[in-house]
Amino acid sequence: MLELSVIIPTHKRADILRQCLDHLEQQTIARKLEVIVVSDGHDEEASQLCAHFTGKIPVVFLEIEKAQQGVARNRGVEKAQAPLCLLLGDDIFLQKDACEAHLVIHTVASSDEFAHHGTTAVLGHTTWDPTVQITPVMHWLEKSGWQFGYRSLQPYAMKFVPKKIQHRFSYTSHISLPTAVARDVPFREDVSLYGWEDMEWGMRIRKANVRLFYNDTAKGLHHHTMILAQSLERMKILGTSAVHMKQKVPSFDRLPPLWKQWVMRLMIALTPGSMASQHRRAFLKGIQDA
């Protein structure tokens, strides 16, 4: 009997997707899972991979016209058959008991003891995969929280994240929630730039009385490597997309106000060569370009 539908958006990364699926095959509750792979644009290799993938887990493959990850997730959730869904990146390799760890929290959360918290979403822990080359900027991104803020979440391990800040950690690379809620609160389909669609979605699931529980025992490895130039380009795009998101969603709070932008410029002037200043400069350039 299916208990968890794993939704994986993908685009032109069949080799990594194969490894992601292999890790799902090794899950302790593999026979309770289904996997829905949604290709964001045509991908013949991913199509063939899923068509010939045999094992304990049924794999459904969907292909949509090139859009963005939020649209791909929505299409996958629409096909989900299990009562719970896990939104997963195609480059997130789960530890063998990760899916079981998600289900344990959802089972407890459905009890009368947790009823006053409302509906529960479960965030798993993710760190860099040590099998890839971990560059200095990757070390800094993890330590500083500029990409994933798991260090600042540590005080809330195995607890609910404070409601007022939970949207900042609604990382859709490794998060589970009831399928019905994911259908009722879909991702926006009118944004095209990378970044912030998960936090905007996090704002709306919070408004729908969904609380975020951080389960640091549900572990995944981010199989991805990045050099400084790539990280700075990503920050520039995030600056541009923050402006666009603010235009669409006035309550969006990730675009720094003007006074804070001036503080960022001051910090850049004081430490021009630091990792933080380089990333601040790229982010502000993206805002300026927008």
Image: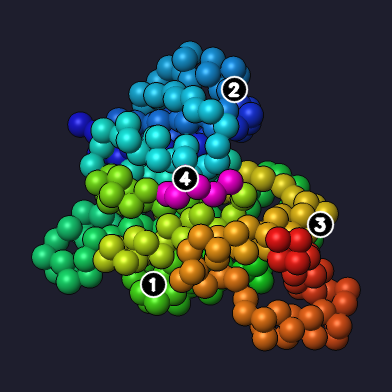
Labels 3 and 1 touching (C-beta < 8 A): no
Labels 4 and 1 touching (C-beta < 8 A): no
Q: Secondary structure at mark 3?
A: helix
Residue position for label 2: 43
Q: Amino acid at mark 2?
A: Asp
* Numbered badge on residue 228: 3
Residue position for label 1: 161
Q: Position of residue 78 (x, y in %)?
A: 32, 35
Q: Secondary structure at mark 4?
A: loop
Along the line of sight, which residue is nearer the eye, 49 or 205?
205
- Distance from disc 4 to disc 1, alpha carbons, whole Å, reads 27 Å
Seen in the image, is 91 located left or right of residue 267? Answer: left
Q: Name the image quarter holding the N terminus.
A: top left
Residue position for label 4: 189
- Distance from disc 4 to disc 2, alpha carbons, whole Å, reads 21 Å
Labels 3 and 4 touching (C-beta < 8 A): no
- Distance from disc 1 to disc 2, alpha carbons, whole Å, reads 37 Å
Along the line of sight, which residue is nearer the eye, 67 or 43?
67
Q: Secondary structure at mark 2?
A: loop
Task: Please tell me which of labels 4 and 2 falls first in the chain.
Answer: 2
Q: Is residue 205 visible?
A: yes
Q: Position of residue 191 (x, y in %)?
A: 54, 49
Q: Amino acid at mark 1?
A: Val
- Other-residue count near label 1 (Cα within 10 Å), few / some / many at <14 / 14–19 / ≥20: many
Residue bounds of the magenta highlight? 187-192
Q: Note whether 240 is above or below 173 in the view shown.
A: below
Task: Please tell me which of labels 2 and 3 falls first in the chain.
Answer: 2
